[in-house]
Image: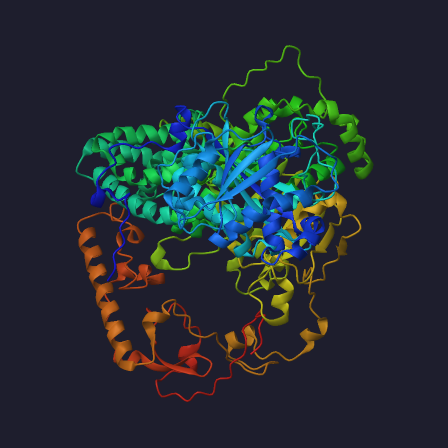
Amino acid sequence: MAEIYSMDEADNYGNPFHRLDFSDAVAMDLLSDYKVLVLMVNQEHANASVHDLLAMMETTNLNDAAKIIGCWNGLSKHIAGEEALPLTDTAPMRRAVAFCQSIAASRQVEQYFADIVQAYRQGSPADDTALGCTVQHVDGTQNALKRNQALQWLRDEPDENECRILSNVRCLSEGVDVPALDAVLFLSPRNSQVDVVQAVGRVMRKAEGKDYGYIILPVCVNEDMSPEEALQDDKTYKVVWQVLQALRAHDNRFNAEINKIELNKKREGRINLIGVGFEGAPDGDDNGTEEPETPQYATQLPLNLQHWKDALYARLVLKCGDRRYWESWAKDVAEIAGRNITRITTLVGESDADYREIFEEFMAELRQNINPSVTEADAIEMLAQHLITRPVFDALFEGYSFIKSNPVSKTMQAMLELLDEQNLETETKRLQGFYDSVRRRASGIDNAEGRQKVVIELYERFFKEAFPKMAESLGIVYTPVEIVDFILHSVNDLLVQEFGETLSSGNVHILDPFTGTGTFLTRLLASGLIMDTDLERKYRQELHANEVVLLAYYIAAVNIEETYHERLRSKLDFHAQGPAHAGQMSRRLGTDLKSVPGIYTARKEGEADDVQYESFPGIVLTDTFQVNERDGDMLDQIFPVNSERVMRQKDTPIRVVLGNPPYSAKQRSANDDNANLPYPRLDESIKRSYAEHSAATNRNSLYDSYIRAFRWASDRVGDEGIVAYVSNGGWLDGSAMDGFRRCLGEEFDRIYCFNLRGNARTSGEQRRKERGNVFGEGTRTNIAILFLVKKKDTRGKCQIRYHDIGDYLDRKQKLDIIRNFGTIGNMENLWETITPNKHHDWINQRSETFLSYLPLGDKEIKRSKGTGNSVFTLYSSGVKTNRDAWVYNFSKENLQENMQKTIAFYNSEVERYRLACERKSDSEKPNVQEFINYDSTKIHWADLTDCVAKGTDKFSQENLRNGIYRPFCKQWLYFDPNWNTRRYQQPQIFPKSDSWNFVICVPGIGGDKGF
């Protein structure tokens, strides 16, 4: 059995006694810095130039000739556009070494390099200064004298306008030194990273007048192929990936740069992508400098240059980016968080009265700020999360005062400092590599959008893996920015249309009640919808956000704060461009924006230019649904600022509620101890509206989180306002949602519904029509964007407008459509007006003829056990066990063994709970849900928790029955009311174990699948 050892394993090799990185050597002026030039040579252009020459050559093909053309352009430094090299380093290169795949290939380069360049330059203006290249081949079969002569030739001073190239130089020993070497050319892949790094080391050696060493990587591009298609050819681009991977492994700066390529808007640095031989005049560089008068043999690709570059940059990140993804760190984090939770739990237990008293005060105020159902375990987990994530924010946002200025962060930190003498942070030292990777990923990003992408990665790829139970409970799904921007611009248009205001207007308070990572408010601040003159007022007074998850709250706060400060720094003057913008919007909306109060305000004289860090006062760590469940003031000592923010928000009239509410309906398993919480006032409001007006029998889905979010927002905007959510679209045609749809039509004046489809729970042709979900794998439900407009004193018949995005569209196509629309104001001719029927169906309206059919069964007839107009007087749902793995089995003996074991464990927990409750009053008895052991290998609790206080249970042989688990799948079932969550009418249909089976099975009510 082979074992793999790595020299970075200190246990096997010990700690390094000295390390000098490339970056440190450059900083100490021991080495010159380097740049990588990837020359993309147009195959058709190269062919037109050298076709006749290639016809006379027997061994050199077009691909080889194109690479030589690319190398000559790179050596000449005739590079235009944004790839232009620094003006201080425009002199052509004088000395280079080249790597070829074989001795034969190297001899061809020596023989044909000058001829190919000459053929390529034919037809160009005469130029006495054009670079001439002389190539000498060297290989290991030559004797030492000849190799040394070749090396000396390279060291000697070249003639004017001459570049000397030594080809196939792998045979030269590592110690060979040519300080004046300008470039290394890789004409074929290298299988050894050592070769690459040694070559780069040679080209970085210091020499007088030398600013950079260059690594030149020529590739042949077929212009007739799309970049994505061309990049699938790993053979062509293998040299690029291998060289860059070797550099990444040995230069920490290069590693960071690769991982930031897709994030930065300006990508100049060590990696430069240059197009060679494409028609079209070169563009100017980013700084607006004029084109030099020297002939430009290399030009940028017209029209599709950016497409090629973006594709190549994206593939480069994929091929050469950081190999240790944050998902793998998340597994370490989950383990370390568990250890910290154990240590904190022990520390704040009953053994130390001082710690216990402090912790109980902390927990009481968490319950008041967030939710009364916050348990001791929840509070401890929050402390553990803060302990782990604080260094993440130090790494993500270096230079910001977030940890010191955010009120919740300060409270968490103060609590941990009280416990700090226990050295809790020793566990997190193992995560230093993770913190370093975050710092590398975030450092040097030149725009807020790029930093947002890092945050999204952290949220999606780290948080969900590290804390999966919380993510599942809250139904956390990140909202695509195309949808966020569409909602923001649509709400702005609706405000103008319905209220003569904008999102920038004074006293238009905007609330994102489920802010997640703060994307909605971040995009709002960056969008320009808020005028510069209104920015500070809006940020300080009129923007509001709630979040219940600690880590998401931290990310949202720092994202919003950073975007605000970047906006201040940028000094964007929307006042200057306002009239044109206002004219355009006025024509589209039919409203004179210039007359709208608050849009254009004169900038204050002497307004300070200094940007001081200012925390966002509108964000609150709280459970939005819980905010209106309590009355009175919140007199907190531990979370005073957060509590004051909650109270201020409660007293603020909200005009706009927008966001992406949580989708989670229920916990998947009772063993998760992860159920959604009750909200008596909110649920009573649902009962008196959506549920009361529903004809459905089972109305449980009306208490799903996203439906609660609509009820809460509808109440929160009062008599006038706008609600804009992207949410689960199950309400559109769900049979239990008839009351919900009815109430929307009765409570609001205008409704706009944009159905994005994507329901993965369909099948066959319908599934193909639904196709992509805009949230990707984040959810399997169909998605809809809903705008609800409520106006005071204008209540009439509600106007419902609906648009279906279309069939057979994938995720990207749907997001492109949304982005191209930009706002509902651009969809005027696409809306369909919906008139609900008397059953409050909006789409897929039922046929009245169906109601004339004789029913198979009727609840009233079943309840009275009488006769009537139905086929059957008795019907029932199937057995719902909530623990199939325990109560079903093909083997009767295995089923008996499983049930005896789980009943024995249940009885042991009942006895343990009984002993814990002895001699205690009801108020002193422990909470059952917090007390019991949720070991899923021994029991599946479901609703068994309600039975713990009643006493033990015993196994009964009589409960072993034959059952149909699935169609044509016969199994043994343990048929018992305690161990089956719902048995419905099954005991009447099968009163005895030997009862005859005369049952006819049909799909359930509201089912969307056939037999």
Residue 189 percent across, percent down from the top left: 48, 51
Work out which quarter of the rendered image holds the C terminus and state it: bottom right
Image quadrant where residue 735 sits:
bottom right
804 in relation to 338, above or below: below
- Residue 150 appears at what percent x and percent y? 45, 39
Measured along the vertical axis of the image, is residue 444 above or below residue 141?
above
Residue 824 as seen in the image, left or right of residue 61: right
Quadrant assignment, res 593: top right
For the residue pair 773 and 839, the one nearer the viewer reads as 773
Q: What residue lies at 34% left-to-right and 81% top-to-bottom? A: 961
Q: In the visual, does 620 lie left or right of 530? A: left
Between 801 and 841, which is closer to the camera in this rendering?
Answer: 801
Q: Residue 158 at what x, y percent from top left?
A: 54, 31
Instruction: Work out which residue is located at the far top of the displayed protein and give it.
Output: 606
Q: Nearer the viewer, residue 1005 or 663?
A: 663
- At x 25%, y 68%, the residue is 903
| Image-quadrant location for residue 32 | top left
Tally of numbered discs: 0
Q: Position of residue 305 (x, y in %)?
A: 66, 43
- The answer to whether residue 711 shows anywhere in this view is no
> Between 557 and 661, which is closer to the camera in this rendering?
557
Q: Quadrant of the N terminus?
A: bottom left
Looking at the image, residue 659 lies above or below residue 30: below
